[in-house]
Amino acid sequence: MSRIQEKTRALVASKMKLDESEVTPEKNLFNDLGADSLDFVELSVLLEREFNVKFTEDDTAKVKTVADLYQLIEKYTSK
């Protein structure tokens, strides 16, 4: 597991008050992990701070799963 995946998984688990083992790539942030729109905005801000990136609204609108978060962060950190 990459550093991005480890940190993202830990932040999602912490924000959603879940055990890290519940946060797997295929899990839907909303349907499976119980996030609502405010949770997602707060999580996005945490991830932006952690990885020193700034997401666009278009990019975050496409995020549904934990794997989508990994891909989004990797997109911005590989620039």
Image: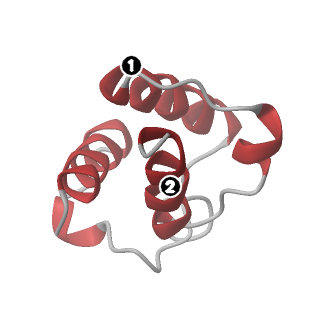
**Label number found at residue 49:** 1
- Please rate how many residues cluster around mark 1, counting C-alpha atoms within 10 Å: few if below 14, some from 14 to 19, many from 20: few
Q: Label 1 amino acid?
A: Arg
Residue 68 lies left or right of residue 5; in this view the side is right
Q: In the displayed orientation, state which residue is furthest to the right.
A: 58
Q: Position of residue 36 (x, y in %)?
A: 64, 44
Helix, strand or loop under label 2: helix
In which quarter of the view is residue 16 placed? top left
Color theme of the render: secondary structure
Q: Is residue 43 above or below residue 3?
A: above
Residue wearing tag 2: 69
Q: CA distance from mark 2 to mark 1?
A: 14 Å
Q: In the displayed orientation, state which residue is furthest to the front.
A: 79
* Residue under the image location 40 percent in, 74 percent down: 25
Q: Camera-side residue: 32 or 43?
A: 43
Helix, strand or loop under label 1: helix
Q: Label 2 amino acid?
A: Leu
In which quarter of the view is residue 46 placed? top left
Q: Is residue 18 above or below residue 46?
A: below
The N terminus is located in which quarter?
Answer: bottom left
Q: Position of residue 57 (x, y in %)?
A: 79, 33
Residue 10 lies left or right of residue 46; in this view the side is left
* Residue under the image location 31 percent in, 66 percent down: 23
- Please rate how many residues cluster around mark 2, counting C-alpha atoms within 10 Å: few if below 14, some from 14 to 19, many from 20: many
